[in-house]
Amino acid sequence: MNEHANTFILTLSCVDRPGIVADVSRYLAEAGCNILDAQQFDDTDSKHFFMRVVFAVVSSTENLVSLKTGFENLGLKWRMTWDLRPKNEKRRVMLLVSKFDHCLVDLIYRLRIGELPMVVSAVVSNYDRTCFNHIDFGEIPFHYLPVTRETKMEQENAIWHLIQETKSEVIVLARYMQILSDGMSAKLNGRCINIHHSFLPGFKGAKPYHQAHRRGVKLIGATAHYVTSDLDEGPIIEQDVERISHRDTPEDLVRKGRDIERRVLARALRYHLEGRVLINGHKTVTFMD
């Protein structure tokens, strides 16, 4: 039997008031549940409270449906935004990719070794299948959806229909080099994750690592964030950096950049899948493991 079969993850946020933790703990105890891990955060700026609880069901009479039904009154009392799901549940994730495939390959590898609790519903690219002949997709469906400036909305509609058809819960832009429209960003609010390089100063346009090399950048990094209509300015989930020296060539920066991008994206996606990320306005509360 799966050790997580009777284990659940509860996440919640609401306006902060005294008594929330007591009520949640009391409800779980009365439902015959044993708390295994609990993390909480009171944001004094936004006056909001955030909590993640992992618990095991000891009572044989409780299941996901009854737990959700029982928690509804508590959610209404505190006006919570909350979610309750089995710990062993695998979410359906769609991966969007363009020409650079390092993040795509890394996520598929982590999927196959059991590191990421997900089912890849589809890989979607604006480059055709021949660009990825070196990748073993196995049974993962691949969809080629080309796009031009004139066909952008038509292509986005096709992606949206595919998201609905495959029942994809999470969308990952694994170096997908197309800007989503405001409408698409709104539809995917809180469930679309993007990865991009992080430089100080910022370098836009073609070959950012070559631009960074010309300016003698000493740190390069990557940022994973939720997609919003503000380009690359959505709530940040995870970041990382690496030192650069004068000995590094532009090719060294590209190589090191690939490594940072794939590990930051993988961590961000795992945090999201495990219910560790709660959106707090323009930023996030991320409960680390």
Image (tube, rainbow, N blue to C red):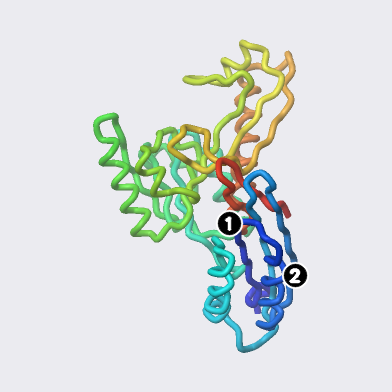
Q: Residue at x 65, y 37 (%)?
A: 239
Q: Amino acid at mark 2?
A: Leu
Position above or below: 210 against 64: above
Q: Position of residue 148 (x, y in %)?
A: 29, 31
Q: Secondary structure at mark 2?
A: strand
User: Badge 1, how many Cα within 10 Å: few under 14, some, many 20+?
Assistant: many
Numbered badge on residue 192:
none
Tell me where residue 256 sits by quadrant.
top right
Which residue is more in the foreground, 18 or 283?
Answer: 18
Query: Which residue is drawn at the image coordinates 46% and 40% (left, top)?
Result: 228
Alpha carbons under labels 1 and 2: distance apart: 18 Å
| Foreground residue among 180 and 213 | 180
Q: Amino acid at mark 1?
A: Leu
Asked if residue 124 lies left or right of residue 102, the reply is left
Q: Is residue 65 above or below residue 183?
A: below
Q: Is residue 235 left or right of residue 247?
A: left
In this view, which residue lies farthest toward the bottom? 61
Q: Residues within 10 Å of mark 2 (few under 14, many from 20)?
A: few
The image quarter in which residue 177 lies: top left
Which residue is tagged 2? Answer: 36
The residue indicated by pointer 1 is 273
**Is residue 16 among what the camera can see?**
yes
Can residue 113 be seen?
Answer: no
Looking at this rendering, what residue extends furthest in the top direction?
214
Placement of 78 over or under 252, stated as above or below: below
SS at badge 1: helix
Relative horizontal placement of residue 255, taking residue 35 as reference (left or right):
left
Q: Nearer the viewer, residue 283 or 101?
A: 283
Residue at 71% x, 72% y: name it. Answer: 25
Q: Residue 164 location, x and y as percent?
A: 35, 57
Number of callouts: 2
Sequence-first disc among 1 and 2: 2
